[in-house]
Amino acid sequence: MDPIKERRSIRKYSSKTVDKKLIGEILGAAVLAPSAKNRQPWKFIVYSGSSKDELLAKMETGLTKTREELAHLPDSEYMLSDAFNTLRIMREAPVIIMVLNTNGSSPFMDIGTFARITEICDSLSIGAAIENMLLKATELGIGTLWIANTSYAYNELVDHIGTTAQLIGAVALGYADEAPAARPRKDFGDVVEYR
Ligand SMILES: Cc1cc2nc3c(=O)[nH]c(=O)nc-3n(C[C@H](O)[C@H](O)[C@H](O)COP(=O)(O)O)c2cc1C
């Protein structure tokens, strides 16, 4: 329970690098997660230094394009300014781990109902792996941010990564330069029901 209670989304990082051995321990926790039919549909690509800078330059290109394309939608500026804020955080974090679903394909493709069920199960499995990463990192004193705002630069990022797998999102890793209080949760009684 300790890492579960202590974990926070960290949005300010010091410049201290994360030891490769610790990154390995965090990914070692990821791959111990359960997965639907034990498919283990995950792949993790670790970016740091200049390869991270190049990846995030592509993300900026993609977000800028999406901002222009969605400008006519009422909520788009809110969504895109949040995504640009996430990009700023990703630039500050010393390590970004891109997370792929190796069984998945582009979310812009229509898929049938059964393929969707499989995709949901694979997404859940990858979510479990990501949570394991966050908890292991917390135990090691390393801050994390779970990121899905990569989706607003989807095509640019998968092209740059050079993959046909589905991009699920990213995890930022680094030493926290903030100590946020716990974020609010819904009342237990509103989310739990006994019958
Ligand atoms: C699937 C998922 C996607 C998320 N994407 C982002 C993101 O792109 N940018 C960001 O700043 N936070 C992101 N978050 C973090 C949430 O905002 C955060 O978990 C939530 O506000 C609760 O705060 P806590 O993690 O400190 O408990 C994401 C979390 C999840 C689970």
Image (cartoon, rainbow, N blue to C red):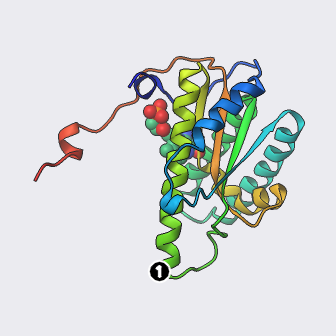
Residue nearest the observer in this picture, 7 or 37: 37
- In the rendered image, which residue does mark 1 sit on? 113
Q: Hey, which quadrant is residue 100 in on the image?
A: bottom right
- Picture coordinates of residue 190 (x, y %)? 20, 44
- Picture coordinates of residue 13 (x, y %)? 67, 23
Q: Hey, which quadrant is residue 68 in on the image?
A: bottom right
The outermost residue toward the right is: 50
Is 13 located above or below residue 167 in the figure?
Answer: above
- Amino acid type of the residue that numbered disc 1 sits on in the rendered structure: Thr
Q: Hey, which quadrant is residue 46 in on the image?
A: top right
Look at the numbered disc 1 and say if its residue's Cβ is closer than 8 Å to ligand 1.
Answer: no
Q: Residue at coordinates 57% horizontally, 57% vertically from top-left?
A: 76
Q: Residue at coordinates 76% horizontally, 19% vertically from top-left?
A: 15
Residue nearest the observer in this picture, 75 or 178: 178
| Residue 36 visible, this orientation | yes
The outermost residue toward the front is: 38
Q: Is residue 28 left or right of residue 92?
A: left
- Picture coordinates of residue 107 (x, y %)? 61, 69
Q: Residue at coordinates 49% horizontally, 50% vertically from top-left?
A: 34
Q: Dot 1 surroundings within 10 Å: few (below 14), some, or many (20 or more)?
A: few
- Picture coordinates of residue 59 (x, y %)? 76, 50
| Residue 9 visible, this orientation | no
Q: Is residue 189 left or right of residue 161?
A: left
Q: Residue at coordinates 75% horizontally, 18% vertically from top-left?
A: 16
Which quarter of the rendering shows the N terminus? top left
Indicate the secondary structure of the residue bearing disc 1.
Answer: helix
